[in-house]
Amino acid sequence: MSTTEETIKDIVVKIVHCEREVLTPESTFQDMKADSLDMVQVLVALEDEFGIEIPDEDAQKFKNFSDFVTYVEARIAEKK
Amino acid sequence: MLRGKVALVTGSSRGIGRAIALKLAKEGADIIINFFRRREAAEQTAEDIEKLGVTAKVIRANVGNPEKIDEMFDTILSSFGHLDILVNNAASGLPRSALDLDTKVWEWTMDINARALLLCAQRAVKLMEGRGGKIVAITSLGSSLVWPGYIAIGVSKATLEALTRYLAIELAPKNICVNAVGASLVPTEVGLAYARGGQLGDDSTWQTTPAGRMVSPEDIANVVAFLCSEEAFMIRGQTVIVDGGTSSAPFGFTHKGEGD
Ligand SMILES: NC(=O)c1ccc[n+]([C@@H]2O[C@H](COP(=O)([O-])OP(=O)(O)OC[C@H]3O[C@@H](n4cnc5c(N)ncnc54)[C@H](OP(=O)(O)O)[C@@H]3O)[C@@H](O)[C@H]2O)c1
């Protein structure tokens, strides 16, 4: 598992207060029991952590946890 | 006319903020468009504003975060050097009842809707020093009337209106006019989502006003532009209600004309 993925998990667990085990690549926001405010706060925390921007236009396409990780990794790679 | 003036409209990527930005641009002001999540919408607004022959600058900042407010004002300082108009329009919140309102939603809503005016005003005043300015906050009838599920936002708007009065008096000697514009339901994305959430009853209960139609974003923008004009110089610390008469008609508005 990549360190990026670990960091994302840390952030989701902290904000959504879900169990870490819930976060598999397929888990959806319903699985995480995240409401819309949780979601925005997760996105903002990821932006601050990785120094990237995740506009709503992109975030709306995320369906599960692995979409998050793939997107964040791609944006980090773009920055380098 | 606002030619040569610089105006910041928070939350102006879409909705009422966008209408205010366009109106002030039509009056000749250069516009700083602030947004949080929707970059494409903000850039579209900037493009539409530049077609009016003024400058538009897009700055992303979550106004709920003091550091981001500071960064936004640092950018305004370096790009424009001063500011003439601050419109505190950005708002957020979630439907809750009093018994379900947790500290997370409370803080989120208060920080974005109310504290942001204080922090933006503190920075804006420095950029208005020696030249005067106008500050207008956008508020809602839900600050004094009870709207279903609206407690978090309603309470934050009541704070915003109190803040408006305090700022108006403290900033009066600096030649800065501070006022608020309060709206009833306006059919923007959030306005419609709230109304269609079902809590307001069927469509006919909210789709009109005694004035015969809903309040539009442009109705709000017109009053903001007036408050930013010299003609409004003696209006201080007020909340001007733009609601087509709704708040004066608690029993509804079924008047059909003379003799009915
Ligand atoms: N619509 C109504 O029925 C109604 C009634 C009474 C009062 N109002 C007031 O009118 C104002 C505008 O409402 P609206 O209906 O136009 O809302 P809207 O369509 O939801 O637009 C909200 C705007 O605020 C921005 N925003 C949200 N959170 C922000 C944050 N944390 N930092 C910076 N910008 C943020 C949004 O940016 P993004 O596009 O980037 O998300 C967007 O530009 C608000 O103060 C609202 O309370 C509205």
Image (cartoon, rainbow, N blue to C red):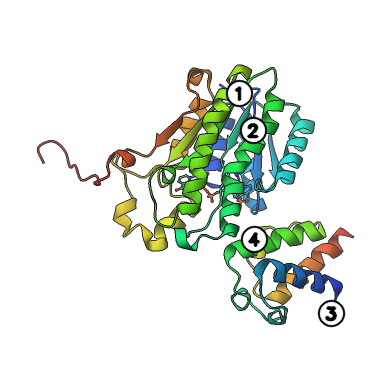
Q: Is residue B147 left or right of residue A2?
A: left
Check disc 1: other Cα within 10 Å, few if <14, some if 14-19, many if 20+: some
Query: Is the Cβ of the residue at disc 4 closer than 8 Å to that at disc 3?
Result: no
Q: Nearer the viewer, residue B101 or B235?
A: B101
Q: Which label lies toward us, 3 or 1?
A: 1
Residue at the limit of the structure toward the left, as seen here: B259
* Disc sitting over residue B75 in the figure: none
Helix, strand or loop for disc 3: loop
Cα separation between marks 2 and 3: 46 Å
Q: Which residue is mark 2?
A: B121
Q: Is residue B99 left or right of residue B107?
A: left
Q: Quadrant of residue A12?
A: bottom right
Q: Is residue A9 left or right of residue B22?
A: right
* Disc sitting over residue B171 in the figure: 1
Q: Which subunit holds the residue at mark 1?
A: B
Q: Which residue is mark 4?
A: A40
Kindly identify the amino acid type of the residue bearing the numbered disc 3: Met
Q: Which label lies toward us, 2 or 3?
A: 2
